[in-house]
């Protein structure tokens, strides 16, 4: 069974021969521990393509993160990298003041002048399930453009400027998603981090009013082209998890160990594919190999009944021993 076949069967609950594998390596790993990364990939071949870097970290961003300093992204916001290999933070938002909004335009050339020929050839030559680059991320992009504190005030006061900016971003992302849907990729990947350690970052009712309809439209476009919708979100998102499922997301990558895994399984098993992940706050960097295996067994007991609906995914961060990454995939093979 090829990786593409395995992932498709997993997403459609058609009993793949095993859970598909997917490893995200953050920039530090690809920059400074690539030899270790290559050994793990050789030992445990992945089923999802373009996963050499965590989705969203393209070559330009990785190169910018290679050294401490500042760089400007394609949207005009300035990022500060404090530690080589670790993505920094926006310190100079492009629209820090609403006066800056008058002259602002999204980087339309990124979606209107994009050449998909190389992507299409890569998909044709691979037997892996191929994902797009990150497409829509409206909540995060608002933060990058306005600054997080400014944005929370915008949302709290319901400013007309914020809604106008969100409409502009949605127009951009509609075109971005539609462009990827015309390519040969199997799945379209979009994301927004919605939680902290306690719960959603904004009132769930506001999320449902402002952002949920956007996600529904992205999923409708993706499904109308016969593609699968893959979504990533960090934090404790249990309160709005059902909303993600409801709008039509096929696979959700979330911090399972920040939530009640068994309760998520009770509510949503068989309705969505759980696209990982392992506990990267405690177990992956600081746990023993046996603790890693035990964490995998907990996920498998809750979610893996052999019919599909779960992907063996983990993220490899700077502090994670190679042995613990290998232990993840060893345990999925037990």
Image (tube, rainbow, N blue to C red):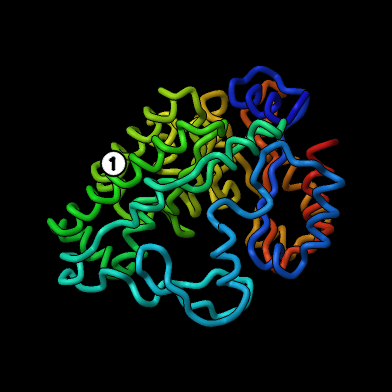
- Is 23 left, or right, of 232 in this rendering? right
**117 or 92: nearer the viewer:** 117
Count every numbered label the image shows and give the total. 1
Q: Quadrant of residue 97?
A: bottom left
- Is 10 left, or right, of 161 in this rendering? right
Q: Which residue is mark 1?
A: 208
The residue at 65%/31% (across/down) is: 124
The residue at 33%/52% (across/down) is: 108
Q: Quadrant of the N terminus?
A: top right
- Name the secondary structure under disc 1: helix
Q: Position of residue 227 (x, y in %)?
A: 50, 27
**105 or 211: nearer the viewer:** 105
The residue at 17%/53% (across/down) is: 164
Bin the neighbour count of mark 1 within 10 Å (Cα to Cα): few under 14, some 14-19, many 20 and up: some
Residue 137 drawn above or below residue 147: above
Q: Position of residue 208 (x, y in %)?
A: 28, 41
Q: Position of residue 260 (x, y in %)?
A: 55, 44
Q: Position of residue 58 (x, y in %)?
A: 56, 57
Residue 9 drawn above or below residue 253: above
Residue 166 drawn above or below residue 46: below
Q: Quadrant of residue 6?
A: top right
Q: Which residue extends farthest top? A: 14
């Amino acid at each position: 069974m090829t990786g593409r076949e395995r992932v498709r069967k997993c997403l459609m609950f058609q009993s793949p021969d095993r859970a598909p594998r997917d490893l995200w390596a953050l920039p530090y790993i690809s920059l400074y521990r690539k030899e270790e990364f290559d050994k793990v990939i050789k030992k445990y071949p992945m089923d999802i393509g373009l996963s050499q870097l965590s989705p969203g970290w393209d070559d330009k961003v990785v190169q910018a993160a290679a050294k401490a300093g500042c760089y400007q992204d394609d949207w005009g916001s300035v990022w500060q990298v404090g530690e080589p290999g670790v993505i920094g933070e926006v310190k100079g938002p492009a629209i820090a003041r609403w006066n800056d909004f008058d002259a602002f335009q999204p980087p339309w050339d990124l979606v209107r002048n994009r050449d998909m020929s190389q992507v299409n050839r890569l998909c044709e030559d691979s037997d892996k399930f191929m994902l797009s680059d990150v497409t829509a991320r409206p909540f995060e992009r608002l933060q990058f453009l306005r600054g997080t504190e400014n944005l929370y005030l915008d949302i709290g006061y319901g400013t007309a400027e914020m809604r106008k900016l969100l409409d502009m971003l949605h127009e951009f992302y509609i075109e971005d998603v539609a462009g990827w849907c015309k390519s040969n990729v199997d799945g379209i990947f979009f994301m927004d981090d919605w939680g902290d350690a306690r719960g959603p970052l904004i009132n769930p009712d506001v999320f449902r009013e402002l952002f949920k309809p956007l996600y529904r439209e992205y999923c409708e476009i993706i499904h109308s082209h016969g593609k699968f919708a893959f979504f990533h979100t960090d934090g404790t998102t249990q309160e709005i998890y059902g909303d993600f499922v409801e709008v039509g997301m096929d696979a959700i990558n979330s911090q399972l160990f920040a939530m009640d895994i068994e309760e998520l399984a009770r509510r949503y098993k068989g309705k969505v594919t759980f696209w990982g992940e392992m506990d990267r706050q405690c177990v992956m960097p600081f746990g023993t190999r046996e603790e890693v295996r035990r964490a995998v067994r907990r996920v498998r007991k809750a979610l893996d009944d052999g019919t599909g609906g779960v992907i063996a995914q983990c993220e490899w961060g700077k502090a994670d021993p190679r042995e613990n990454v290998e232990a993840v995939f060893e345990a999925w093979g037990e």
